[in-house]
Amino acid sequence: MSKITRRDFINGTLMAAGASMLPFGCTSEVVLDKLDPLYYPPALTGLRGSHIGSYTNAHARAWTGKSDWGPTTDLKEAYDLIVVGGGISGLSAAFFYQQEHGRDKKVLILDNHDDFGGHAKRNEHTVGDDTRLIFGGSQSLQSPHTFSETSLKLLKELGVDLDRFKTAYDFDFFKRNNLGAVTYFNKQIFGEDKVVKHPYCDYPWYVQGLQRPKLSHEEAVKQAPLSEKGKEQLLRVLKGGLHVLKLPKEELNEYISTHSYFHYLKTTLGVDDAGVLEMARNSSVDFSGAGADVLTIGEALECGVLGFDPLTLKDLIGEKEYEKNIKEHGYILDEGDQYIHHFPDGNATIARLLVKKMIPEVGEGDNAEDIILSKFNYSRLDKTSNIVRIRLNSTVVNVVHGGDPNSSSEVFVNYINDNKSYQVKGKGVVMACYNMIIPHIVSDLPNEQAAALRRLVKIPLQYTTVGLKNWRAMKEMEMGMAMSPGNMHQVVMMDFPVSMGGYHFTKSPDDPCAIQMIGCPFGETVGAPPVEQFREARYKMLGLQFKDYEKEIRAHLSGMLPKALFEFDRDVESITVNRWAHGYAYGGSALFDSDMPEMARKGRQPFGRITIANIDSVLSSYLQVAVDQAWRAVKELG
């Protein structure tokens, strides 16, 4: 057994399992006082995100209809508000509720994971005496100056200075180290392990400062490990463009909104080479969350997939339609906001600030700068003396009104912790969880609303973070980001170079760092309906053990990086696999599930003293949307 596998099994899987099995019975005050002092989820490695144990009871409820977990203990706890889900939306709902109704209002937040924040996950990698911070899910504040008044007000109240990122972000880091975007072709699919210093798509350019390729399209194609036929087709795609459709501009927008990108590749450009199609399918990555095989031409343009530069959209469809697409989809950044608003741990900083505001004794720090290096004391999250309490490792399985939903003044919530059933009571409930689970735990919802909520599937995502003792090999390869078509992780990248709050981004290639590996798993059948592909990929993701992920990561990094400078067992200190079986909200398109927006509208309606938040409510995946939906849900409670 290799060194990294042993170390991760001890520090990750066993500790995570141990934390989730701590005796959270009777009253949480008694239990949390008995927590191991080492209980600190951000430092755990191994299988994280939707970690083992976090989804067991929810799946039992949804898949088999399980309702009997043995005797239920009534904790005799009554709250003004109970929030189901401790992600950004749930935490924001709790914060807004107290703002609206008073800081003396008692709130309980229940979450099935062993940490709060939801997708806003903080990963800490300890390399020697150095701690490297990185995001394990929710990444950055995108175009924050365009946020709603509600979201901007919240950021200000939390102590976030948006102008601070202008100095916190090291714009010269990638230029100083000559790091750009490359493509790694793996031996299993392309016949040899090879790196070409060209990304073949526009995905990398949201990273501010990343160096543009020096290779021309012709030279990049020449170096690609494809057959002569494949090279000819790849060059055809890179030099294609929508002018080949020969449509008048007034017809073009409708055409690209209703026709498949893969149909365009195969029919218009005559592409049938398996290697080129594999590159194309993997080139949208987490910009869309789905493979490019299910995108419209317009969606492919916005994602900057193989052969498309989204900045050409304005010339193709006109400035008015271009601005409309920005407003509706948000894929193209507002010219006034560079993509630099990234905390060292991603949006976990926002989650931590919300918790600190509501539970002041949890740790040090009063603003976004102070909070970066603050180590939270998790044993203080669920004290009986708290006005706001956060109860982790607690899966809600039943939410029901005390009487007629139209007139009831109380809601009973049952949850499972350590395989035991508990009940608490609230005057109102905000469901800020994965919305597709809601019909299974709020069983008396109107049929039409329940059916709509069941449609709101999510896209599986995987954000793996790796602690490295140095990044000499990446420096040698001039690699700030590597597109990796056909690998489990389609992207490997250096983190955003941000230093703030006493935390300093890695400086020298000899220093430790944490890198991000991004994967959007697809189904086996190219072009199959997205929902089918998501389901297949989700089952496969959750069926893998850590050793399977580590084997893939080992092969990926070892095949991509020069052996003279990189040795996996020597240079990799730790691995954290953030599996999000239910990641981005899926919004559908003209090609598939075009009724999704209407399903979201029907699904988010209030039901008696129960309201619904989360990004699923409007089919988005941005932090500001989670915040705005929390505000709406709280206002609906009155």
Image (cartoon, rainbow, N blue to C red):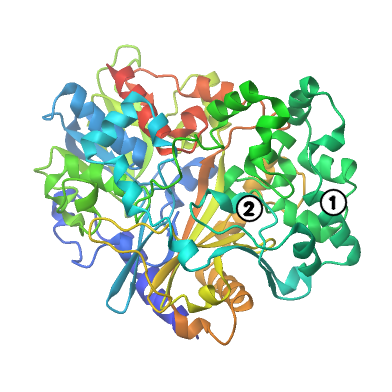
Q: Which residue is mark 1?
A: 236
Image height check: is 1 above or below 522? below
Task: Identify residue type, mark 2.
Answer: Ala
Image height check: is 284 above or below 41? above
Secondary-structure class at tag 1: helix
Secondary-structure class at tag 2: helix
Q: Is residue 522 left or right of residue 190?
A: left
Residue 391 screen position, x and y as percent: 25, 46
Residue 264 screen position, x and y as percent: 83, 40
Observer-nearest residue: 35 or 306? 306
Image height check: is 270 above or below 10? above
Q: Is residue 378 left or right of residue 599?
A: left
Asked if labels 1 and 2 touch by Cβ distance under 8 angstroms, the answer is no
Q: Which residue is mark 2?
A: 537
Give the residue drawn at x 55%, y 77%: 476
Camera sees residue 465: no
Observer-nearest residue: 621 or 435? 621
Give the residue drawn at x 80%, y 48%: 239
Task: Sort mark 2 into few (<14), some (14-19) or many (20+) by Cα contacts within 10 Å.
Answer: many
Mark 2 to mark 1 CA distance (whole Å): 31 Å
Task: Sort mark 1 into few (<14), some (14-19) or many (20+) by Cα contacts within 10 Å.
Answer: some
